[in-house]
Amino acid sequence: MGVALTLWSSAFVGIKAILHDFSPGPMALLRFAVASVSVIAIWVVTARRRLRLPALRDLPLLLLCALLLIVIYNLGVNYGESTVSPGTASFIVGQVPVFSTILAAFMLGERVAVVGWVGVGLGMAGTVAMLFADQAGLQINVGAFYVLAAAIAESLYFVLSKPLLGRYSSTEFNAFVTVLGTMMMLPYLGRLGHEVGAASAGSIAVVVYLGVFPAAIAYLLWNYAMTRLSVSTTTSALYALPVITIVVSLVLLHALPTALGLIGGVVSLIGAALVNSQRSR
């Protein structure tokens, strides 16, 4: 999981660095077109038996997982980082354990202890603070709402993908979800051709990197971890994501979240830690 988190952290920084050449939608399409080629190649090379397609009964859930993770999550982060720093975006994504707990309580009827609800409250308070981060004055940063939607979508994905990972290998599942999600973003194809022609070689190289490493390889490693560990255990590792992202952002972009973003991020991570502590009992 450590490798996956490091690669994802670099993705927040890479996305921010190339938004001057690529708009959010076409960037996501190109990134996951590259990722699709990569995951199919990995699937073919590592297959121990004849390649199999997903069962028809699993297709609706696979489509939903692809929509949540590949489309909504990545478009949300891309659009959000148009106005939000990489560090603030990663702090918001770090609230996935909080959102997962809320979803489990209302959708699955899971009991949440008092300490869990305290954690939810702190997480929400920190998230509200981050809605005003990276802006001049007390103005709501619309980009933070996009990242918030991305985090909620990822929370749903982690819950819904667990049964599918029991029926398919991590390489199979990664290939199915990545390709299906990429197909959903084909409406951006027309704009992508124009933007690729106008983009610098460096920006195109960054998109290729984002497709091969943070998308294809990191998701493969994460899905493998989810076949071995519980949802709460894997999502708890997301606490490290903002720390790594801030370090990478400082080194490569010389950028840090605002003071409000850092305060809100720390408060929200304390809340997420409390939530996870009661889920692990």
Image (spheres, helix red, strand yellow):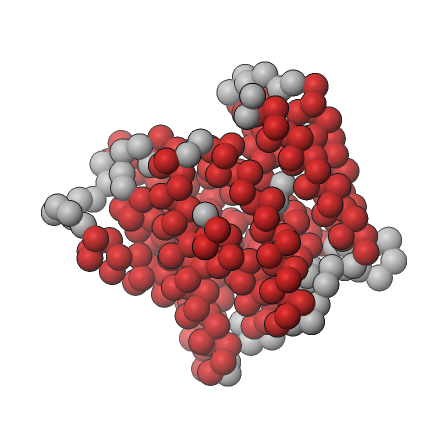
Query: What residue is at 41 percent from the left and 34 percent from the top?
Result: 229
Q: Is residue 116 left or right of residue 76?
A: right
Q: Quadrant of the C terminus?
A: top right
Residue 264, above or below 279: below
Where does the image place residue 140, in percent across and percent down from the top left? 78, 52
Residue 86 in view of the camera: no
Q: Is residue 155 left or right of residue 190?
A: right
Q: Quadrant of residue 19?
A: bottom right
Residue 107, above or below 17: above
Residue 277 in view of the camera: yes
Q: Quadrant of residue 141?
A: bottom right
Q: In this view, does 231 lie to the left or right of 42?
A: right
Pick out the residue farthest to the right: 137
Which one is nearer the viewer's eye here, 227 or 81?
227
Query: What residue is at 65 percent from the left and 36 percent from the top?
Result: 272
Residue 168, above or below 19: above
Where does the image place residue 199, in percent across and percent down from the top left? 50, 80
Where does the image place residue 2, in percent across and percent down from the top left? 48, 51
Query: What residue is at 49 percent from the left and 66 percent from the top?
Result: 27
Which one is nearer the viewer's eye here, 236 or 50?
236
Which one is nearer the viewer's eye here, 54 or 163?
163
Q: Is residue 80 left or right of residue 133?
A: left
Pick out the residue farthest to the left: 50
Where does the image place residue 207, in percent across and percent down from the top left? 46, 70
